[in-house]
Structures are given as C-alpha cells and as structure tokens.
Image (tube, rainbow, N blue to C red):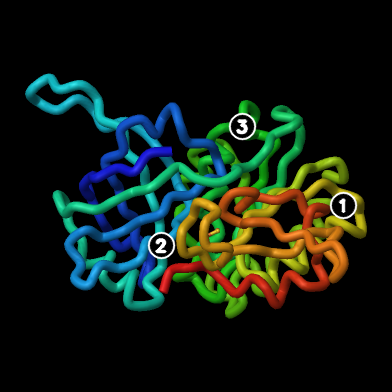
Amino acid sequence: MKNLQTIVLSNEEISPGYYRMRILAPGYQQLAHPGQFVMFRVRRSLPPLLRRPFGIFQIGFLPPDCEGMPEKEFVELIYKVVGAGTEVMRELHHGDRIELLGPLGRGFEISDPAGDKILVGGGIGLVPLYMLADSLPDRSRTRLLIGGRSRADIITVTEFERLGVATHVTTEDGSLGESGLITRILERKLSKYPKAQVYACGPMPMLRAVEAICAAREVPLQLSLEALMACGVGACLGCVVKGRDHSEANPQYLCSCRQGPVFHSHELDWERLHASVEGKEQA
Ligand code: FES
C-alpha cells in the first residue's frame, strides 16, 4: 500500500455521466490485484474532500515519451457522477494533483484459472471485473453479463470483447441488448455451464438475486461489495457487514475495506446484508 502524491493524466466522459480517469501510479503493476480498490482525494479542494473508494479498472504502462524517459505506470478508474465529490472529480484535467492511497483490500481469488467463469456486472459494478478478466489465462471460457437501466449504463463492453470474453448485455428499458434483468441470462448460462464460477459486482438487489441463484445451484460465488467507506484501512469501522455466523451473543463483523471488498458468498449473513450496505461511495 502506498500513499501517492500524483497527477491526473486524462479524464474523459465515456458515456453520459460516466468518466474514465487515468492517473500516474508508479509501482501499481507490482502491487495491485484484480478486485482491489484505491482511496482517492483531490488535493486542491478547499475545504479538503474526504477520500473516496474506487475500484481499479486497469493498470498499465504509458509508451516511452519522446525524450526517452522510461515507461510510466498508470491506474485507471471509472466513475459515475452522482454527487459533490464526483462533480469535483469530473472537472480535473491532465496535470491536476491528487492523492491516491492503495491498492487496498482483498481482491478476487482464482482457484481454477482455466475453468468456466461467469462475470456479472451491474452498471458501474462492471469496473473491477475488467482486471479480473484480463488476468485469466483462458478467456474463451469467460462470459461477461452486463446489465443497466439503459444504454448509457453499458460501458467498456468492446474492451472486454477485445480480451476474447463473450459478452451479453441487458437493459431494463430495452435500449440495448436483451430487455430485462441480467439475472435471467445468468440462469440460462448456469444451465449451460453448471460448473462455472461466478464473480459479481453491482447494486445490492442484483447481488442478492445472484446469490440466491448461485446458492440454489451450489455454484461458487465471489462478490465485490459496494460498501460505504471513510478510511479504507480498517480504522473507522464504517464499512462493516455481518458475517454468516453473527449473533447477538457472538458478534461477527467483517470490514469491507480490509476483509473485502471481495467476499465469498458463504462468508456473509444475507439476511442482514441489505440493511448494512447501501451503495457505492461516490457521492
Ligand atoms: Fe474505515 Fe473500513 S472504511 S474501517
């Protein structure tokens, strides 16, 4: 984990309300794992904004510049503008100074790299799944199911396709792909690939539905929770969720920032989870 004083390299709108920010991030190629996140803070804001968590979309290297400088590592975040913090972020340009704390948290585990995988992303929940897909050795056995309210919520699908991942899109209003919820396609795919491992990230109603489908079929599921986070390092306890064995007499709290954000579904108390996780911290 590093606390970098660094700069924005680019910040572009890729779909109405969705932005993609590239940030100079030395050392991330070695440090970051699929599913991890960073805490982001704008340095010039007055009063200073709190850090906010964002899943890592991808990491990479810039090409050497014309003066023969060595390659520079970058990290890319994708965010949706939903409140004051992300309103400030979208005004950032090349060269603006920011702070980046990370990479943080527990990422995805890949126990059977060559086996069938189904990735399920709801809207901005697709973000941590790209680095996961990119890390898999046999992407011909990986399917991405991406759902959103409308066409504007369906982002970066062509980049998954360039990795060799088969993609399936649903929108609730039918403006792109199949009309309806992504969980209907998940049921179909699991009938065809019953031994697949499922990885999911998205809004809580979607995660609950995915969990119910996977539990009924005894399919292993890892999911990335979009929990509210203030510190990102286990200090504030603002991100706790209840574990499967939680009870009044024997409390079991799990920090989403340190023990997650990725959990195996069997680690969590699904009865109480809906009340303790409220959506991505991007406001
Ligand atoms: Fe502070 Fe997790 S965000 S403990």
| Residue lying at the far left of the rendered structure | 67
| Residue lying at the far front of the rendered structure | 249
Residue name at image x 28 percent, y 46 percent? 23
Instruction: Give the residue type at disc 2.
Output: Arg
Q: Secondary structure at mark 3?
A: loop
Q: Secondary structure at mark 2?
A: strand
Whether residue 169 appears in this view of the structure is no
Q: Which mark is residue 191?
A: 1
Q: Which residue is mark 2?
A: 52
Residue name at image x 72 percent, y 60 percent? 253
Instruction: Give the residue type at disc 1.
Output: Ser
Task: Please indicate whether residue 217 sits to the left or right of residue 117 in the image.
Answer: right
Per the model, the C-alpha gap separating discs 2 and 3 is 28 Å
Would the CB of label 2 be found within 8 Å of ligand 1? no
On the image, the x and y values in percent for residue 35 come to 56, 45
Per the model, the C-alpha gap separating discs 2 and 1 is 39 Å
Q: Which residue is mark 3?
A: 136
